[in-house]
Amino acid sequence: MFEKIQKIKQRIGPLWWYSAILFFVLRIGDVVNAFIGLWLVPRYVPQTELGAVLPLTQVGSVLGLPLAIILVPFTKYLNTYATRGELGKVKCLLRDMFILTAFIFIFIFLLARFFLPLIFERMRVGEGSLGLLIVMVGVAGVLCQVFNNALQALKKFRAISVINFLSSPFRLVTMLVFMPFRALSGYFVGQAAPSAFLVAVSLFCLRKELGPHIRSESYWEKEWRAMLRYTLPIALVLTFGAIQACVESFVIRHRLPDIDSAGFYVISRFAEIGGYVGLTLTFVLFPLVSERHERGEHTQHLLWQPLVASVGLGFLFVGALHFAGHWILGLVPSWREYQCYAPQMTLLTVVYVLRTGISCFSNYEMACGRFAFVPYLVVVSGVECVLLYGLTGVSYFSGFLPDRFVAWMVSLRAARLTFLLAVMLWCAAFSFVCAMVHLGVRAIRRKNNGSTL
């Protein structure tokens, strides 16, 4: 039996083998997460606060942005050193990452004390202990990525599968215990619990790389310039991407009525399913491409397989929601008042599918150390943010812009969920087309040059 499994693994290759395992494990977790997002949260969180769940979660992501940026060279070089068998540098890099995380946590906590009250005011929720919990979730989420990326870079996909298999039930139990007492705070306690679990298990899984028998070997003196060159362009992408996600959820909560922001929360739980396949494939893609690129091997086929699969299956799901979305939203009593948002759910799913394809492409480029895609992705993200908040906050421009132009902006009636989703869709489609043109131009050049890499 074991030999047959090994033959199947060799036949389909490591990308699809580990992707299949992770996909199976993550989908089990997604069933639990769907139960939390589509039943548990709407049950305990009132409609007046339901729309604040996503933007407050994005606050944690923005708070953890400095650490997320540092993770960029961390994952790349950890994989590089592991591929070369330089375990001393692996240990030194892991140790430095843990130290930086501690300092950044203190910085994030101090920073959050100043601007979180302003955010709670705009999100129409009371602060209480929520501020500290959001900081903890933001840092725990990124700290979770530190260990997750360490396991990913070292290709410990079996450990990742076990952790993901157990973390979602752990999250569910935590929320079932805390949410009945205080819904929003209990939700964020449940968000932090799986991260703490992952850190504890990851430390055990990394005991070989962190053990005393491995002697630390310095990497900074020789590598810092290359690390800086590698990090700066990706820091731009991560920063603008985090701001973009934050602005999208914030503008919907800030500018739209409670019912619209609550409806967006519900339909986004379904829309995210369209990116499940692509996100799983992309997770496995990065270390495999990085390793082969370091060896000078052919990598192009590793991009097209997950890209076509994620976008293709994603649009099949879009078609299913288009025809059955209204029926699906009528299955559960707490969803029925959001049935009118079925067309917007289809629109949002298309956005997520396109972004999954863009993520697949950008992760492939980063794994190969290429960053020509950065300028247009950053520009599109910035333009979208300006359009979303600018068009919904027209009153700010009175007296600064010509009255005729302000009147035209008012006539758009931008403070509508359909309009905001349309802006998101056009920006996602433009970025995706740019990525495909990018790949097409490169393929033509390589064909003319006779290159195969």
Image: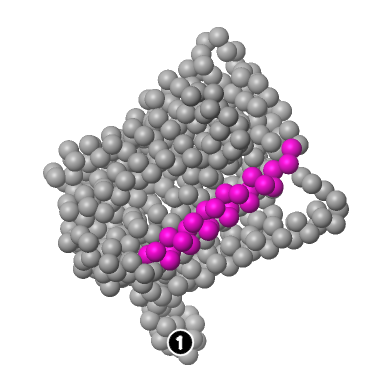
Front one among 200 and 242: 200
**Helix, strand or loop under label 1:** helix
Q: Residue at left 75%, top 56%? A: 442
Q: Position of residue 267 (x, y in %)?
A: 33, 62
Q: Is residue 309 magenta?
A: yes
Q: Residue at left 53%, top 50%? A: 238
Q: Quadrant of residue 136?
A: top left
Q: Residue at left 35%, top 41%? A: 28
Q: Position of residue 66 (x, y in %)?
A: 49, 43
Q: Is residue 324 magenta?
A: no
Under mark 1, the amino acid is Trp
Q: Residue at left 38%, top 74%? A: 418
Farthest right residue in view: 449
Quickly name the residue at label 1.
408
> Up-down: is 404 above or below 1?
below
> Up-down: is 163 above or below 40?
above
Locate residue 219 relative to residue 310 in the image: left or right.
right
Its colouring scheme is: one colour
Q: Quadrant of residue 433?
A: bottom right
Front one among 405 and 19: 19
> Up-down: is 124 above or below 28?
below
Magenta region: which residues?
Answer: 297-321
Q: Position of residue 262 (x, y in %)?
A: 27, 63
Locate residue 333 relative to residue 63 in the image: left or right.
left
Front one among 198 and 91: 198
Q: Work out whether residue 243 can be spotted.
A: no
Farthest left residue in view: 181
